[in-house]
Image (cartoon, helix red, strand yellow):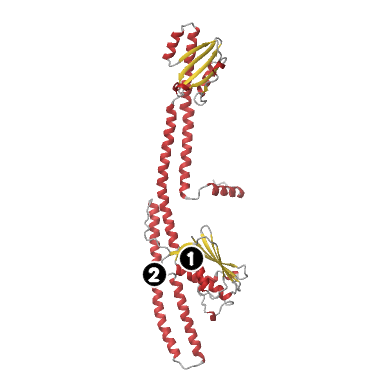
Amino acid sequence: MHIKLPQKIEDKLNFWRRKLLPRTLFFRTMLLIFVPLIVVQIVSVVVFFDGSWSRMGRRLSDNLVDDIKIILALREEGLSFDKIKNISMQKGIDFDFYEGKSIDSFSQQIKANPIVVAYLQEAMQDAFVNDKWSIYVDNKNNGNTLIILLDKDNGVYKFLSPKKRIFSSSIFMFVVWMVATSVFLFLVSVLFLRIQVRSIAKLAQTAENFGKGIDDDDFKPYGSSEVRMAGMAFIEMKKRIIKQIVERTQMLAGISHDLRTPLTRMKLMVTMMEDNPDKQDFLTDIDEMEKMLNGYLAFVRGQGDEIPVEVNIDELVKSIVAKALNKKIKFKSSNDEKIIIAKEQSLRRAITNIIANASRYGKKIEVEVKKYEKKIAVFVDDNGPGIPKDKRDDVFRAFYRLEGSRNKETGGIGLGLAITKDIITAHGGKIFLDDSRLGGLRVIIDLPL
């Protein structure tokens, strides 16, 4: 039966769950191992101390107090001091009697640990209700001897007894061994889990690199059978994607060859025609078809076989700005290093296309590069006419043209932003359009580090 909690309570629970629970699989699994281990340790120790240790401690303390009572009874019966001392030594107790003294004269002794003598104190309290007594530690024997002082009417009795008569060190050895074994097993679990998590992290990193256009040929699945299955499935998927891209490129190369020949023949035939009003229109249409064909081939071929390298985004954007037709572009960037692994020429083409569009439709242009924790962002602002909000998703479609801002005379065929988005996405990034503070369009390119 599922109990529906109020929304505020669920929100608070979710908030604290996100705050308190670790984010990584490694630490979450460690939490699943560590918490039950600690609970078992605590329960075992509590049950053991409350059962065996307390029962044994009370029995040992009662035995020692009974021996003290026997010694006192023999003393009251008038047995000689030497005989009583021999009997007490047989019981493991040494005693002395200080006639006429009070227990206060022994107050400089070292007090015994309350944990060790807790049950002995209870037994003494029950046996000598009307007498004054104290328990100390004899520091002459490394603290292994207890001193029990009992104040009677005629003087003070001093009893010396080994600590082991009321306290068994094997109890603590049991706890030490239990904790040590648990810590050892916990460390073994940590080492084993690190290997398992490392295989998952390697698979995730390889998949992320492939999304950025970086192919890790040396990746080999390892770890548990489930992780290896996921790794093999990823490798097969990658092979199918690469095969599809190669076959698409080869097919389009054939289409290019087949279409260029008739276009060239048509252009030659139109050129040889006599001059008439339609001749120039035919040539213009043929030139536009060639541009569309070249643009389409560039779009579907994507980034080709270019190898990813280290690219300094600051230097790349600076070089593009320096070669732009608009020489009044304002460039801003922080001093921190902005290096990513990317296909430099493809990325140059994408950013060049954005800056060229801004130069074409705006007079005032600002380009800024910022580095964040996990990404680098490139902002291109202009003061041009901009793009309506309801059209900003459409402009990334192939061959889509905004009639209000573009025409055939500009040379555009509606593939610039489509190619740019294809390149940015292939690098694992994103591209957005927004309103510019200059009054025109802002293009934002996010590239992952």
Residue at numbered disc 2? 246
Classify 101 as above or below 350: above
Residue at numbered disc 1? 425
Tell me which residue sits at (48%, 9%) in the image: 74
What kind of element bears circle 1? helix
Task: Name the N-terminal-most of marks 2 and 1.
Answer: 2
Query: Of 53 and 90, which appears nearest the observer?
Result: 90
Query: Of 142 and 145, which appears nearest the observer?
Result: 142
Query: Of 233 and 317, which appears nearest the observer?
Result: 317
| Amino acid type, mark 1 | Thr
Classify 74 as above or below 366: above
Q: Is residue 73 left or right of residue 242?
A: right
Image coordinates of residue 213 in percent, x first then y, are 43, 64
Check residue 437 in the rendering and tell me which mark sits there, or answer none.
none
Classify 251 as above or below 34: below
Image coordinates of residue 151 in percent, x first then y, are 55, 14
What kind of element bears circle 2? helix
Density class for disc 1 (Cα within 10 Å; few <14, some 14-19, many ≥20) is: some
| Amino acid type, mark 2 | Val
Density class for disc 2 (Cα within 10 Å; few <14, some 14-19, many ≥20) is: some
- Among all residues in the image, which is located at the extreme top? 78
Q: Is residue 327 left or right of residue 57?
A: right
